[in-house]
Image: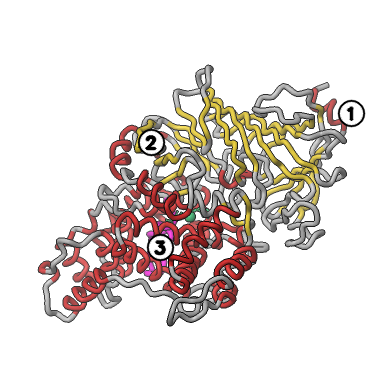
Amino acid sequence: MSALLACALLLGCRPERRPPVGPPTDMPVGVAPTTGVTRDVHSVSHPDEVVVTHTGLDLAVDFDTHVLRGAATVAIKRHDPSAPLLLDVRDLEIRKVQTGQVRDLRPLATAAVAWKDATYTVEDGEFGGALGVTLPENADAVRIEYTTAPGASGLQWLSPEQTADGTSPFLYTQSQAIHARSWIPCQDTPGVRSTFDAEIHVDRELTALMAAKGLPSEEKGTFRFEMDQPIPSYLVAMSVGAVEFAELGPRSGVWAEPSVLASAVSEFGNVEAMIDAVETLYGPYRWERYDILVLPPAFPFGGMENPRLTFATPTILAGDRSLVALIAHELAHSWSGNLVTNASWGDLWLNEGFTVYVERRVMESLYGREREEMEAMLGKQDLVKELAELPELEQRLSTDLTGRDPDDGLTNVPYEKGALFLRLLEETYGRDAFDPFLRRWFTEHAFTSVRTSDFEAFVKAELIEKHAPLAGKAPVDLEGWIHNPGMGPGAPQPESAAFDVVDAALASVLAGEVQVKKLQTESWTPHEWLHFLRALPASFSPEDMGTLDDAFGFTTSTNSEILAQWLETSVRRGYRKTDASLEGFLLRVGRRKFLTPLYRALIETERSADAKRIYAKARAGYHPITQRTLDALVQGR
Ligand code: BES
Ligand code: ZN
C-alpha cells in the first residue's frame, strides 16, 4: 500500500473536494473582536482566528517543467484555539500537510521538527481555493508540501529568446494583487504581515534573487534569504535568471542581464539622491538596502515595489533619465505601501495615491518644480480622460471590490485622483503643516495595514483640527474627495510654462503659420514631446503624420513612452508607415499600460483583424496578467 493511500485510509488526510466557498459571510467585514485584523473579500483566510506570523519556504525551481516544488512552513498565532487554519491557494498541487510545534525556531524553511500528518480540505473559491487545516491542540506551525502549476498566475517562465541576452531562461514572480497564492499557500491579504526565510534550489548556473536579505550559502545552486520585517504576501518576490550586479551607491545597486547592466547603471545614477530626498521629507528608509532588478521586456508592469528589490521594466531605460519617475515611485512605496499598507484592495489609493504624491515630491526635489509639474500635468490628463469613460462606481477613491478581481479595477483613479487629493491638502494647509503631518502618518502606522477610515480620522484629528487653512484657502471637502465619483471639488491644477510653449507651437502649426520642421524644438525634453503628441488634433491626416515623422523621426524613437504614444496616434490617424514598428513593439514588450491602448486603437479603427493576428503571435510571450486583460479586449473573452 502506498504511503499516501495508507495515510488516506487511516488518518483521513486526503483532500476532499467541496462546493465552492464565497467570500466570508459569517462575520461582518470591519469587525474584529479579538485581534484588530479584519477579513478581506479577496482572501479566504480568517486572520482574526488564526494568523500566519512567519513563513519558511523551501522551493526547487524546475525550468524543464515550469514548476516550483517544495514546501512552505507557516508559524501561526491562534486567537481562537478551536479554529482551523485557512490559507489561500490557487492551482497548487498539495501533496502533504502536516502540523507541529516550532516555537520560535528559525530558519523555518528546513527546520527539523516532529511533523504529524494533518487532516485538511481543499475547497474551490471565487479567487482560487481554500486550504483548511485542522489544528491539534499544541500545534503552532503547519508544513505544506506542494507543486505550482505551469500556468501559475503569479509566475512567468521565459525562454532564452524572451530575455535581453537570449542565453538563459528566466523566471520571475509578480504577487500583487492576489497572485502570491499561486506560488505560496498563504493568507493572501494585505491585512496580514509575515516575516519569512527561504531556501531556493536552482539546478542551473543562474542567480536566484528575492525581495529580502540574501544570506551566504555553502551549497552551489542553493540560495538563502531572510526577511525579518513583517510584510504582506503581495510583496513576496523572487526571480531566477542570468543577472549581474552593479553598485549604485552605499546602500543601492542594480541587477540586470549583462547586456543591459551598463545602461541601467547610468539611468539609475540618481537613486541614492532619491532615497535621501524621501528621508528628508518622511523619515528614515527602513529597509536597509534599495536595489533594482531590471527584468526582461515581458514584465507586465512598469515597476513593482518589492521590498529591498524593486522590479522594473527595461522600457524605462531611455538613456537620458527621462523616465526615472518610475523609480521614484517604486522607491516611495518603501514608505507608502510597504511600511504603511492598504488593508484591502478597495483601499488601494492609500498605497498608490500616496506614492504618486511622494514620487512627485521626490522629482521636484531632484529635478525642480518645472519637471514635476510636467509630470503632474500628464498624470492629470490621464485621469481626466479616464474619468470621462469610467462607470461612476470606479471613480471613487475608496471602492468596494466585492466579487471583482482587483487586477481588473486598476485605473488612474487611485493613482492620480489620490495624489491630487493629497496635493489639495498640501496646498490648503501649506507644507509647513502638511509635510510633518504626512511624516507622522508613516511613522505612527509603520508596519501596519490601514483603511481609508483610518486616514480620514487621522486627517481630521491631526491636520484639520490642529491647523487652519492658509489665507484664502477653502476647507477641503473630505467626503466629496473620498466617497464621491468624479474629479474632487477644487482639484489642484498643475501649471507648466513649458507645456504652454508646446501648445503655442502646435497652435501655430495648425494655423498654418509655421512649418513643422521650422519649429524651435531643440530644448524640448521627452515630456514636452509627449505633451505635443497627446495634443495632436483628431483632424490630423496621415500626410500630416508623415510630415511630423520626417521632421522628428518618432517611429524610430528609443523612448518607450514617446514611441507608444506615437504608435497609438498613428493607428488612430490611419498613418500606416508605423505598422512594422508597431508589430515589433507588440511582440517585444509585455507592459500592459502600453499594450492595452495600442490593441484598443487597432480595434476601434476597424483593424480588429490586425489586432487578432498580432495577438495570436504575441500572446504566448505575455505575462498571464497581460493575457487576461488582452484576452478580454482582443478576443472578447
Ligand atoms: N504596485 C504597482 C503595480 C501594481 C498595482 C501591480 C496593482 C498590481 C496591482 C506599482 O507600484 C505601480 O504603480 N506601477 C506603475 C508605475 C507607476 C509609475 C505608476 C506601472 O507599473 O505602470
Ligand atoms: Zn505604485
Q: Considering the numbered disc 2 on the image, is that residue within a helix, a strand or a loop?
A: loop
Considering depth in this image, is 607 or 561 the residue closer to the camera?
561
**Label 3 is placed on what type of residue?**
Pro
Considering depth in this image, is 308 or 408 the residue closer to the camera?
308
Left or right of residue 324: residue 51:
right
Looking at the picture, how far across and down is residue 550, in whole percent?
A: 15, 62
Q: Based on the picture, tell me whether residue 593 belongs to the magenta stretch.
A: yes
The mark closer to the camera, 2 or 3, is 2
* Residues in magenta, as a range: 591-611
Q: Earlier in the sequence, mark 2 or mark 3?
A: 2
**Label 1 is placed on what type of residue?**
Leu
**Label 2 is placed on what type of residue?**
Pro
- CA gap between label 1 and label 3 equals 57 Å
- CA gap between label 2 and label 1 equals 58 Å
Looking at the picture, how far across and down is residue 99, in whole percent?
A: 79, 32
- CA gap between label 2 and label 3 equals 40 Å
Q: Which residue is mark 1?
A: 10
Tell me if I can see residue 509 in this picture: yes
Q: Which mark is residue 597?
A: 3
- Asked if residue 9 is positioned above or below residue 597 in the image, the reply reads above
Q: Which residue is mark 2?
A: 250
Looking at the picture, how far across and down is residue 55, in whole percent?
A: 66, 36
Q: Residue at x 66, y 24 (%)?
A: 110
Q: Considering the numbered disc 3 on the image, is that residue within a helix, a strand or a loop?
A: helix
Q: Which mark is residue 350?
A: none
Q: Earlier in the sequence, mark 2 or mark 1?
A: 1
